Amino acid sequence: MTGDRIEEYLETIDSLGKSRGNPVKNKDIAEELGVSQASVSEMVQKLADEGLVKHEPYHGVELTNRGILQVNSIRRKHHVIEKFFSDVLALDPEVAHNEACGLEHTVSDLVVESMCNYLGNNNIDCKPADGNEHCPFKESYVSLADLKEGDCGTVVMMTLSGPSKERLSSLGMITGENIEVKRKQKQGSTSILTRGTEIALGNEIAKKIFVRLGMRKRYPRGNDRN
């Protein structure tokens, strides 16, 4: 699953849930995205395996708390990009919005963080679209490479290249996931535990993964995740 496709499905499920009520039917998702119901069923199962949605056959699909957090993160990213384009580059609001829609799934967290910092340093209000949430790019976080054995945290940002990020995602390491540092190797590598899987990371990779100390509540696979 590519990240942008995951995000597209999550946003669609969230939008349909708000406009038509939860749970959302697979056929409605298919119509909204212009894909087959078979494709939707396959993706929904994958999203359920990742703990992002819960699905009951013949009943529908809805986001878990973790899925909602990821949708909110996407929308906050969109907000920062649109704000930067409209307030800094002075683009027409409609153009800024449309460009942000295209970039929110592809631009790196590092770029958006830089935009957010620029806005803040120039006294431009960078308050997230959802006023009840904290901006993820203003949170206090540390590099995974700086953590010590036994430290636990939640991944908030990965400034990695596409292939590296996708490889780690396939192992269960994604934004919002809990991690624990199991051991620090003499050569600089770090072994972390996430979702019951131990992953060894080179120092250069670990430096590009940022963690907020402390762990969010974990929702086990197969159980009610709401």
Image (tube, grey):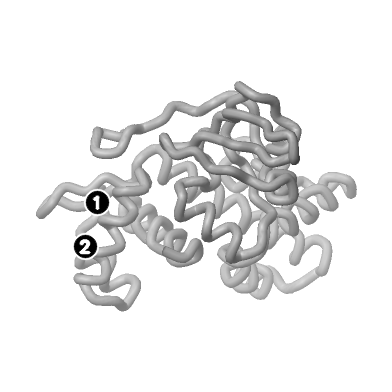
Q: Quadrant of the N terminus?
A: bottom left
Q: Total number of numbered labels? A: 2
Residue at (10, 54) in percent of width and height: 58
Near-viewer residue (185 or 97): 185
Q: Tell me where residue 104 sits by quadrant.
A: bottom right
Q: Nearer the viewer, residue 69 or 93?
A: 69
Q: Is residue 64 above or below residue 111?
A: above
The percent coordinates of residue 135 (x first, y second) are 66, 41
| Quadrant the C terminus occupies | top left
Q: Position of residue 106 (x, y in %)?
A: 60, 67
Residue beneath the point at 65% across and 36% down: 211
Which of 177/40 is in front?
A: 177
Specify the amino acid type for callout 2: Asn
Q: Residues within 10 Å of mark 1 (few under 14, many from 20)?
A: many
Which residue position holds label 2?
Answer: 26
What's the mark number on residue 171?
none
Q: Are marks 1 and 2 in contact (CB under 8 Å)?
A: yes
Q: What kind of element bears circle 2?
A: helix
Query: As drawn, is 32 to the left or to the right of 118?
Result: left
**Residue 61, disc:** 1
Provide the secondary structure element on which disc 1 rests.
strand
Q: Position of residue 201 (x, y in %)?
A: 63, 45
Look at 22% across and 48% down and name the residue there. 55
Residue type at the position of mark 1 = Val
**Left or right of 204: which side holds 226?**
left
The percent coordinates of residue 14 (x first, y second) are 38, 53
Residue situated furthest right in the rendering: 122
- Above/below status of 38 relative to 47: below
